[in-house]
Image (cartoon, rainbow, N blue to C red):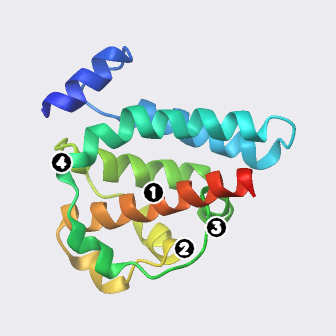
Amino acid sequence: MDETVTRVATGLGLPLERLDPMVDEMVAFLVVASVSREAREELIEEAVRVFDYALLPAVRQGLDEAALHFIEYTGLDAIDMIDCIGGDALSETISWAVNTLAGIPVDRPKEVEAYAECAGIRGDLLSADDTLLASAVFYSFVAAINRVVQSLVA
């Protein structure tokens, strides 16, 4: 297992075999933020904290920049993604991408297709290597997270 994944997961007291608990926590904050106007900013900040300090370091070395050429601009933010495919599907897709990029073998869930459609990932990438597709999923989610943060300051 990647040394960064081990260090991040150990620091958070998480089981080392999968990164799903971190993804579930991040998506849960976003789901609640999508319906709770009172705590929206606080919840989004918590989701971004998990993303920045736990997930991003765990996958950074596995990302393939070639995936950027397969993503079309949609303008969706992370809350829009939840509206598009639902929190569970978003969590499944991001978990798969994060685990794949961190070198943890997992099966590709069917939700990846729905995510790709919402996120503007070209359909021909669905038949590509898992690392390239996982990179596209992750990069598109980085953009969605950035958009939701920008909406807080707008």
Eye-nearest disc, 2 or 4: 4
Q: Earlier in the sequence, mark 1 or mark 3?
A: 3
> Residue 84 shows which numbered tag?
3
Residue at the location (74% across, 40% down)? 41
Which structural element holds mark 4? helix
Residue, disc 1: 142
Q: Earlier in the sequence, mark 4 or mark 3?
A: 4
Q: Residues within 10 Å of mark 3 (few under 14, many from 20)?
A: some
Q: From mark 1 to mark 2, how far is it between C-alphas?
A: 14 Å
Label 2 is placed on what type of residue? Cys
Label 1 is placed on what type of residue? Val
Res 99 → quadrant: top left
- Residue 106 shows in the view: no
Q: From mark 2 to mark 4, how far is it between C-alphas?
A: 26 Å
Q: Position of residue 76 (x, y in %)?
A: 61, 69
Tell me the quadrant of the picture where the C terminus can be found: bottom right
Residue, disc 2: 118
Q: Residues within 10 Å of mark 4 (few under 14, many from 20)?
A: few
Q: Are marks 3 and 2 in contact (CB under 8 Å)?
A: yes
Residue lying at the far right of the rendered structure? 38
> Residue 61 shows which numbered tag?
4
Res 5 → quadrant: top left
Residue at the location (85% across, 43% down)? 37
Eye-nearest disc, 1 or 3: 1
Q: Are marks 1 and 3 in contact (CB under 8 Å)?
A: no
Q: From mark 3 to mark 2, how far is it between C-alphas?
A: 6 Å
